Image (cartoon, grey):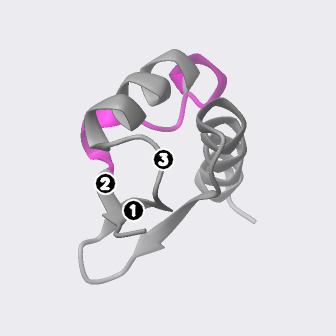
Amino acid sequence: MSSRARSARRLATLLSARSGVSVSVRYDRELRRYRVVWASGPDQAQMQTLAVTSVAAVPDFSIGELFWSRSPA
């Protein structure tokens, strides 16, 4: 597993814990970037704010590099 893949997994764990909903962070081959996916709970702006507070624990990612995708509940 690559360093970025481990960081993606770590970011998903942190966001899930801080948001109270299940979050996944996975590589999207079409977009050629990582996608943050969750259903219900925080909106995109709130999730991005949570990610900003988590970024120190996942130095392989910049918040601007991520694609955000909230599924309808």
- The three-letter amino acid code for the residue at tag 3 is Gly
Seen in the picture, residue 35 relative to 56 is either above or below; the reply is below
Residue that carries the numbered disc 3 in the rendered image: 41
CA–CA distance in space, label 3 to label 2:
14 Å
Question: Which quadrant holds the C terminus?
Answer: bottom left
Nearer to us of marks 3 and 1 is 3
> Which image quadrant is residue 25 in?
bottom right
- Res 62 seen here: no
Residue placed furthest toward the front: 73
Seen in the picture, residue 41 relative to 57 is either above or below; the reply is below
Residue that carries the numbered disc 1 in the rendered image: 35
- Res 13 seen here: yes
> Residue 36's spot in the image, x, y percent?
43, 56
> Residue 41's spot in the image, x, y percent?
48, 47
Nearer to us of marks 3 and 2 is 3
Q: Which residues are magenta?
A: 55-66
Seen in the picture, residue 7 relative to 27 is either above or below; the reply is above
* Front-lying residue, 23 or 35: 23
Please tell me whether residue 19 belongs to the stretch shown in magenta: no
Q: Secondary structure at mark 3?
A: loop
Q: Secondary structure at mark 1?
A: strand
> Residue 70's spot in the image, x, y percent?
35, 60
* Residue that appears at 34% across and 70% down: 72
Residue that carries the numbered disc 2 in the rendered image: 68
**Mark 1 or mark 2: whose residue is earlier in sequence:** 1
- The three-letter amino acid code for the residue at tag 1 is Arg
Residue placed furthest toward the bottom: 30
Q: How many marks can you see?
A: 3
Q: Is residue 46 left or right of residue 60?
A: left
**Mark 3 or mark 2: whose residue is earlier in sequence:** 3
Q: Is residue 22 left or right of residue 26?
A: right
